[in-house]
Amino acid sequence: MTLRARITVTFVLLLALALAVTLGIVSAANGQNAEREVGRELDVGASVFRRILDSNRRQLEQAANVLAQDFGFRTAIATGDIETIRSALENHGQRIGAGLVVLTDLDGRPITEANATSIDSAAMTMADASELPGAGGAGIALRHGRAYQVVSVTVRSPLPIARVLMGFELDQPVLNEVEGILGLDITLAVRNGSAWQALGTTLTESLLPAVLGALPPSGSAGRLEQVGDLAVHATELTRQTGGQVAVVAILSRSVSEVRAAFDRLTQVLWVTAVIGLLVTALAGYLLARGITRPLSMLTEAVDRIRRGEYKVAVAIERGDEVGVLARGLRQMREEVDDRDAAIRRLAFEDTLTGLRNRTGFVAAVDQQLAQSAATSIPLYVALINLRRFRTINECLGYAVGDQVLRHVAQRLPGAAGGATIAARLTADQFAVMADSDVIDREQAMVWAQALLARLSRAVNIEGQKIDIAPVVGIAAAPDDATDATELLRCADMAVDLARRRGVGVAAYGPEIPQPGRDQLSLLGELQRAVRENELRIALQPKLDFASGAVAGAEVLLRWQHPVRGAVSPAQFIPFAEQTGVVRHLTQWALVNATRLAAQMQSDGFAVPLSVNISAADLADPRLDSKVAQALADAGIPPDALTLEVTESGFIDNPREALAMLEALRAVGVRLSIDDFGTGYSSLSYLAHMPVDELKIDQSFVRRLHEDPALVAVVGSAIDMGHRLGLSVVAEGVETAAHAEKLRALGCDIGQGYLFAKPMPPDAFIEWLRGRDILRKPTRRAAPGAAATAAAASAESAQHLERHALG
Amino acid sequence: MSRAAWIMRLGDVAIAALAATVFSSVASAAALTVNVRSLQGAPVSDAVVFLEPERSVAASAPARATIDQRSRQFVPRVSVLQRGTVVLFPNSDNVRHHVYSFSPAKTFDLRLYAGTTAEPVTFDQAGLVVLGCNIHDSMIAYVAVVDTPYFGRTDASGSLQVSLPAGSYRLRLWHPDLLQPAAPESVLMTDAARALTLTAAIAPEPTGSAPWPQ
């Protein structure tokens, strides 16, 4: 849940809770409120109604008193002047709109009345006769089913002689008016025996019986039981003689109407609540957005800073906590940027010389390449190697070495800054990128020569002149390579070329072989080749000079690459040796060679096979057990296998190598020294090496006929081998002349195109047919050799038998 | 003529008339004392008592009387006059009064200004005259007009004295608050003075509306 959502939801929930409580209380209260409100309305209404009656009574009394005290009126009464009396009654009645004005005697008998020519005494019943006599008497009079509010005032002359009755009719308009004032329905009811009869009402007729029925027969005042929807209140207007209520005014109110008002209030509350909730939700959302928007801006800024965009602006200027956070972030960004720059400097700079390091140089050159790629203007890079540096370091110490490096660095064109890009790549390797005015190979050579000349001057350190013997190799982009790393590699090869040629400057060109171009990808593919069985065995026979019989065959590896096709061993074997992958190759060769030997043996061709072992293999302490395992798995005698070891195999760790040779010897395999004469073999080692065979390198054999000195060397080597009890094999026998010369020199066995090229096993077996196979390989006498020889002869015998039978 | 001189002169007239009456029958007249008591035995004041002789009496000169308006009251509240008496209505108040009577024995009305006296009114017919003031309803006075020279009004102790020549008389009693008319009573007078006690049924609350005995 996001912060924004959380704030908004919290706001809304709190308000909703408050509103729910409010609405709950209001709703619960409204039910009671309606009842209470109705009750209150009725009580107030009754009170107001009595006030109205009171006010009417006072008005009537006032008018009646005025009439009763009128001297003329009294005179008329004293003189019995009925016409005058009636006109006075009518006159005063009209003044206040009294519907009833009657003059009675002191016993209440009508004498005359307004608007009547005859006295209608029988129809006149006072609702309460006992209340009416006397001054100030007031009450309700009934006549012809009509109700009047009347007062009675005594006429004196000066003793009481008559009364004036004056009254308002309580007719429908009056009731309607009262209803208008009170907001309550009003019903006038008169007792009729034990039942109640309505004199007038503002209620609908249908409700009357129920309302009248609610009145107790004895009459009652105050609140009555609710009648259906109506709340009812009775006001006693008069009593009959005997104390019974005679006339009542019944006020009533529909509870549901009142409740409807409250319900409307509730509805309004609900609408208000909903609007309030919406407004709050909006306000909460806006408030939350006010908080979260800068937060998400910060988050975005942090994200960009994380990606390394230190120039990102954190444009939030606020006084609150978010502003503080933004300022902190800004500060952090600046500091991280500074540190990053420092780290970058360290990463791209050579601390000793202040020049760029390899990374820095590559980056700078790549950048330059990217810029010049569009224009296709060539870009030249020179790599400088100090040939003597290793010697300087070893002889004069690292401190001097460092000083030399600094001197050299200062001589480089880019040392003092400027546009030229210079770098120290490794210990004694420097690189310089040529300026843009060097635009072809000739100029580049001139530039490189100048560079060399500058660097070749001896370095003077503490009065000691030190010759550093620099070599420069140059390469060009885009001709030689299109990226800095590759460019440096090309320049490096140019350095190698220069060194080999013994010149100061060399340029990379097509004449430089590119062994390493595919090597990296080869590494992975080579491992896959072993795994996926893409390797094949080729066999090149060795022939015995003396008998012409087949003395054995060398196992050579062929790689049938699924895409590249056949890959030359020269392309992958040296690389395999450098990287150690050769161990896998050797293992593969051992297993497959022993299997092939076993198969050939069972086919009747017991030809000893030779497998090449590299220096890396010799360093493997489990090599002997691996060999023994392979022999055991294939089920062939150990002396059917010869392991060929180059002289270089001894150079790194002669002691361990010798120990391994002894171990292999113990396994029982034959051992051969390969490429004899190319390395720096120590003859003393040779003397003690537990080997059986010496293979003279083909470089001697090929040039045998053109160099008489070589004849002496080869002859001596053969002689030496024989003296050490070794059999001597010559490689690279390509012509009959070679063969003749070697045979003359006493060489035992020859190998080369003259006899056969390397061929697949099937072809080799075909080739074998009809040829003799040397029964027993020549070997020097050694402990345990007798048993092995015995086993070998047994096999030979077997073989012969089979041969004879075949 | 000043008002005081008026009263003095009227007084002289009254004394002269009384003296003439007394002296004409001085040899045979005796005093009758009447005490009026309520049913509870309390003395009744303002009770009117008059005695009608068996034989007719010679007409006498018209008497004079005064009914004053003082403190919004008629003073006296109850008067007894022989028929033909002339009554003066002075106004001792500083407010106006409007004295009227609708009584059949004498109907009149007088507008009395403050401090003035209106024309005297002659009560020439026997009977009860109830006086009212049209302005002040509470002012009521009773004037009992009798056709005999022998009458009186009880004082605060409920007694009165009448000097009567010897002979037989019909005694009548009236009071404004009598509940029912008192029956006439025969009184025989000799030369000797005598006393008489009458019991009157007086309403506990004043009604002021007792009818005149016929």
Image: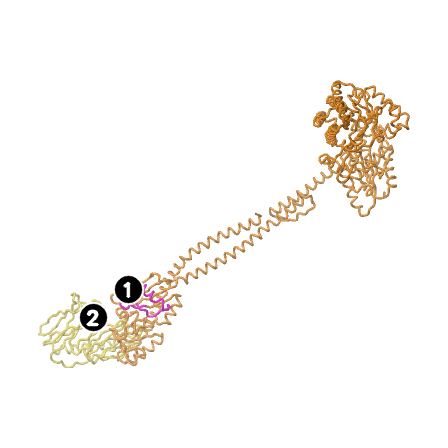
Which amino acid type is marked by label 2? Answer: Asp
User: Separation of disc 1 and disc 2 at Cα?
Assistant: 44 Å
- Of residue A677 and residue A221, the one placed in the foreground of this image is A677
Which amino acid type is marked by label 1? Answer: Pro
In the picture, one chain is orange; tell me its letter: A
The answer to whether residue A616 is visible is: no
Q: Secondary structure at mark 1?
A: loop
Callout 2 crowding tier (Cα within 10 Å): few <14, some 14–19, many ≥20? many
Query: Does A575 appear above or below A376?
Result: above
**Position of A123 compared to A706: left or right?**
left
Q: Where does label 1 land, which residue?
A: A217
Query: Does A113 appear above or below A538?
Result: below
**Position of B92 compared to A506: left or right?**
left
Position in image of residue A771 (x %, y %): 81, 28
- Of residue A361 and residue B15, the one placed in the foreground of this image is A361
In the picture, one chain is yellow; tell me its letter: B
The disc label shown at residue B177, or none: 2
Q: Secondary structure at mark 2?
A: loop
Residue span colored magenta: A189-218
